[in-house]
Amino acid sequence: MSPIMRRILLLYILLSVIGLTTVRAQFDNGRQRVDENGYDQYGNQVDPAMIPDRLDSANVEVQGLPPTLYMWRIKNQLGDRTIIPADTAYHHFQNTNLTDGLTGHYNYLGNMGSPRMSRIFFDRRDPEPTIFMEPFSSFFIRPTEFNFTNSNVPYTNLTYHKAGNKVNGEERFKSYFSVNVNKRLAFGFNIDYLYGRGYYNNQNTAYFNAAFFGSYIGDKYQMQAIYSNNYLKTNENGGITDDRYITAPEEMAEGQREYESTNIPTKLNATTNRNHDFYVFLTQRYNLGFKRDIVQAENDTTPAKQEFVPVTSFIHTIQVERARHGFNSNDQVDKGYYQNTYLDPESPTVRDSTTYIGIKNTIGIALLEGFNKYAKAGLTAFASYKVSKYTLMNMNGSPSPDKYNENEIFVGGELSKREGNFLHYHAIGEVGLAGKAIGQFNVKGDIDFNFPLWKDTVSFIARGEVSNKLAPFYMRHYHSKHFLWDNDMDKEFRTRIEGELSIARWRTRLKAGVENIKNYTYFNQQATPEQKSGSLQVLSASLTQDFKVGIFHLDNEVTWQKSSDQTVLPLPDLSLYHNFYMQFKLAKKVLSVQLGADVRYFTKYNAPAYMPAIQNFHLQPTEDQVEIGGYPIVNVYANLHLKRTRFYVMMYHVNQGMSRPNYFLSPHYPINPRVLKFGLSWNFYD
């Protein structure tokens, strides 16, 4: 374990001890020893309601409440909450730390935490907060992805992943702590430290996130807040100099040498990207309503209880964010590696930097669903104002940066029906009124309903979205030593329709979708932004079908995609994931076990290349076109779950050397060789 990780672990232990000792008396769910004076073994006064009527000895044991908790995420800028399952499932636990995703949807650079891009087009997202942070979606958590917790006992989760050795291995330590002051008010912190040394030269990743959060969920007032700070350092090697070191090693050095991964030469050896992003997010609402009696059974003689029924909500959300990006290099690169040099052409040193600061306020008023029998849906009106400030390098050599300010004002509305068992729908839209928002709009919605079929329930979901958006700022403006653009771009018009059919009893899920894009914006062969004139279409269909016979399971996922212009938007025709495993229980049915192997595969295509100087993927250069894919990646694993503990052991890339070695998930970036991985996750409820 590295010195940095040891310091983080000690800091976490200190914070946990402080937190647990201050709340233990109130929330301890274990066995308490209470003396005749009403004090427990820690010297804390115990709630009299929990003390038995008769204390025959000084060691009476009192059983506390069993632990109960629920988790949720913020759905959108209006602060709507979506309840999610607690993170205790052990299925797919062995894949939770893989940068290519649970089912292998992502291309990435081989090392843990390195920049990635989804091969599944419909899974791609808008680049928020900047194009430099979006490739780190395996680590960076947006406010809408953050887990809040409410529990009757302090809740702690410790998770640790490790692979390889001290020279080329990887480690990741995650901790999550949440405690309730009372049933409404909760707070906690989250720590995430990732360190991937890398199996190839100058490839290591070192990321750290510290987040503090709090929530208050009352009848009238509700609030959720997050402070998140992220530091990301990514060493860049530009890929290996010749793919034959992987695909045909016998052709290199006249076949006289077998190359270890660390000995394979790379294009860059002294180049680094750094990102520092922090945000403060707060959403709050105040409800107006009335109290009504809870319906009781006819023979119930107890006094009627009342519940608060919210009718109207006043909503406010604010997000403040700062993102700094820096690209540093001392490499003497080959001629032609960079197409242009705009600053100090005599020196190989690169010191690119940019900063973004954004403040967004949203206010809204909502008429809530269900306050009487006629209120079948909820209706919300809102407005938002965002100011964005950017600093770019001055291309005239002045130390004073170029500054850009942008303002946006949007107004919008939301219509939703979330209650009931048969039909639900949700639609939200906004249109720009002033500043850069003029001409922009976004409307999206979904509808789902359940209907019976052959003694089972079928769920159908339809989604749609229409948008007209300005390209992200850094696609319009960027100044650096080797890349420079100030583009006047047209707005990107998108129309998307999706449908999803699920039959739980059959373990079947079918998805299909189509999207039409006008003025599609992308990074071209020179790694500079460009827009496609005219329209571009994408078709996609995905089938998830799981089988079970006794203890044997076979999970399958097949995705087909078709781009109308493979040159501008290359996509693999097929992406496959299959997972065969045995699942059973041991040790008096308290130990759950999965033993199996999974494989991920996609057909060959000219995948986007990666440019370190802009930290993004782009179309492959015309003179350097290579296909990746057509190579299965197989992992063998054992996955165990014992009460509050999950544990896995996995042999990653077990099939290395069994077929033609073409194991690239990005052009010129091979994945790691065969390596043993393991992980542990432990939940504490005290």
Image (cartoon, rainbow, N blue to C red):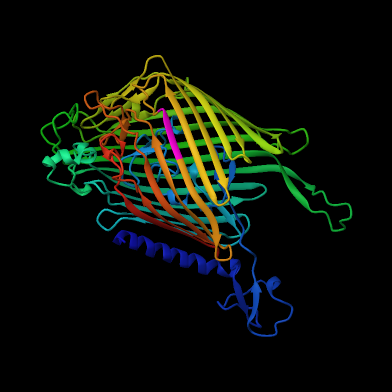
- The quarter in which the N terminus is drawn is bottom left
Along the horizontal axis of the image, is 264 left or right of 516? left
Is residue 97 something that shows in the picture?
yes
Along the horizontal axis of the image, is 55 left or right of 554? right
Along the horizontal axis of the image, is 351 left or right of 476? left
Report the front residue among 344 and 54: 54
Residue 428 spot, x, y in % from top left: 58, 29
Residue 536 spot, x, y in % from top left: 42, 18
Residue 330 spot, x, y in % from top left: 16, 41
Report the front residue among 25 and 88: 88
Vertical placement of residue 251 versus 519, above or below: below
Is residue 431 something that shows in the picture?
no
Along the horizontal axis of the image, is 388 left or right of 269? right
Q: Quadrant of residue 43?
A: bottom right
Label tally: 0
Q: Residue furthest right?
A: 299
Q: Residue at x 58, y 75 (%)?
A: 44
Vertical placement of residue 571 versus 646, above or below: above
Q: Residue at x 71, y 76 (%)?
A: 52
Vertical placement of residue 318 versus 342, above or below: below
Q: Quadrant of residue 649?
A: bottom left
Residue range in magenta is 573-577
Report the front residue among 217 and 595: 595
Magenta span: predominant SS is strand
Is 540 a magenta residue?
no
